[in-house]
Image: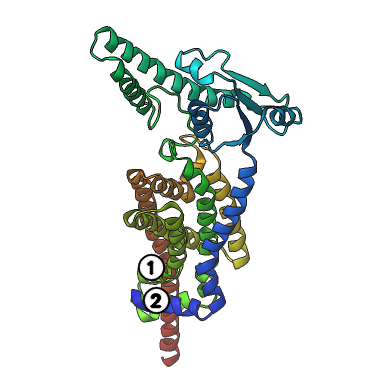
Amino acid sequence: MYKTFIMNRMKLIAGRPFILLSIILLPAILAVGMGLAVSSTAEKTKIPILFVDEDQSDYSQLVIKRASQNPALNIQSVDQKTAERMIKTSRADIAFVFLKGFKQKVMKNEEKGAIQMLISPASLSQGAVREIVAGEVMRLSANAHAANYVTDQYAFLKWVDEKQEKSLWKEAWNYTDEQWKPAPLMQIDYHEGTPHSSIKGAPSSQKYTIWLILFLSLMMLICFYMNDWVITEREDGVLQRMFLFSIKPRAYVGGNLIGIFLLLCPSSLLFALFLIWNVHMTAPQAATWLLISGLYVFLCLLISSLIACFCQSKKTYFSIGLLAVLVTSIGTGLPSNPGSLFNIFPQKWALDGMRSILIGNEAGCIEPAAVCAAAGLVLFFAAVKIIGGKYDRVKRGFKNVRKKESRRAYHAHH
């Protein structure tokens, strides 16, 4: 019975090739295209920072290299005159000038006077940027201090000679530097959002968050668009004729939803291939991502079918659907706290699971996947119960009509 409804629903949709092609290609194409447009705009909002390297040492170059890895900064290396001109015209927030002798001062733990700063009067982020650069300088200073201490102690105990001191100093420096990876031993982390949505240590996941939100929103919108069969078949009298063929409501609801779900799967697959190409996800990660995507799509189909059960017309249904997509999408993109209303939105849970996969935290997607599966199960039985209730009322009404007709025929005969 399920197979009949699945094939029938797929044939009805496949009979409109343009619609079929749209639901397969549009979510992935629009999500990627709009994501690229938003990402390019975000690139322009980075904080412009200037570096003037008068020392031209490996230490100064290392600070510039590490600072440029921060996704919030737009780093430029310029000369002194260019830096002064750009700061005066507010084309950059702050300029750091590594004065001559920078490396020697850092190695002696004398950071004072090693760097000169030029700050734009219009700068609003100079405090945060100064901390970022100061942290990198402190890292080099701490490495040098540790290396100096170890070398002095070994020399005092006469465990090394003068020839071995250089290699010992370098070894101690490298060992100390490794203690800063993947993060300093002591730090303050600021989190926005629920605990399960943390993406600490994965700046690359921020880049794809916009794309994921767009993809999830478009998939929900398509689910609402494709799921108007509940209203159409009710208006066409299909529901009234169901009981004549002993059709179970569970097979009727499940078969139609699965048919639509199977046609939406290629769109998720296309977007997954795009992520594999960009993020270099492994096969198990891609499979987990597709599982969460599938649970999310089926959950959206169930939500839209339940809403359709209570709508008297398609116009009302599509208006509510569009409003639901807009509200949940905006809410998903906003930072939320535990207990916030936004945390019940399906996009929020799906987004948390997908981002966990992108940062390599597969265990973090277990909770979102379990929530989507449990919610889907509850909503499926709710949809069956509601549509089944309508079915039972029609069936009882028809039986009552038949009884009345039988009584009339009996009385007419006698």
The residue that disc 2 covers is 5
Up/down of 217 relative to 153, above or below: below
Nearest the viewer among 72 and 174 is 174
Measuring from the top left, give residue 345's x and y in whole percent.
Answer: 48, 48
Do callouts 1 and 2 mark residues in contact (Cβ within 8 Å)?
Answer: yes
Tell me the element at label 2. helix
Residue furthest top in the image: 156
Alpha carbon separation for disc pair 1 and 2: 8 Å
Measuring from the top left, give residue 359's x and y in whole percent.
Answer: 40, 44
Tell me the element at label 1. helix
Q: Is residue 77 left or right of residue 396?
A: right
Measuring from the top left, give residue 249's x and y in whole percent.
Answer: 38, 69
Nearest the viewer among 170 and 258 is 170
Measuring from the top left, give residue 29's x and y in whole percent.
Answer: 55, 63
Residue 254, label in figure = 1
Mark 2: amino acid? Phe
Residue 208, label in figure = none
Q: In the figure, residue 414 lies in which quadrant? A: bottom left
Name which of mark 1 and mark 2 comes first in the sequence.
2
Nearest the viewer among 2 and 218 is 218
Up/down of 45 relative to 278, above or below: above
Nearest the viewer among 240 and 40 is 40
Q: Is residue 334 left or right of residue 250?
A: right
Q: How is the image coloured?
A: rainbow
Quadrant of image for the N terminus: bottom left
The residue at the point 71 percent across, 25 percent down is 120
Q: Is residue 19 left or right of residue 152?
A: right
Mark 1: amino acid? Gly
Q: Classify 10 Å Cα crowding around label 2: few (below 14), some (14-19), many (20 and above).
A: some
Residue furthest front in the image: 163
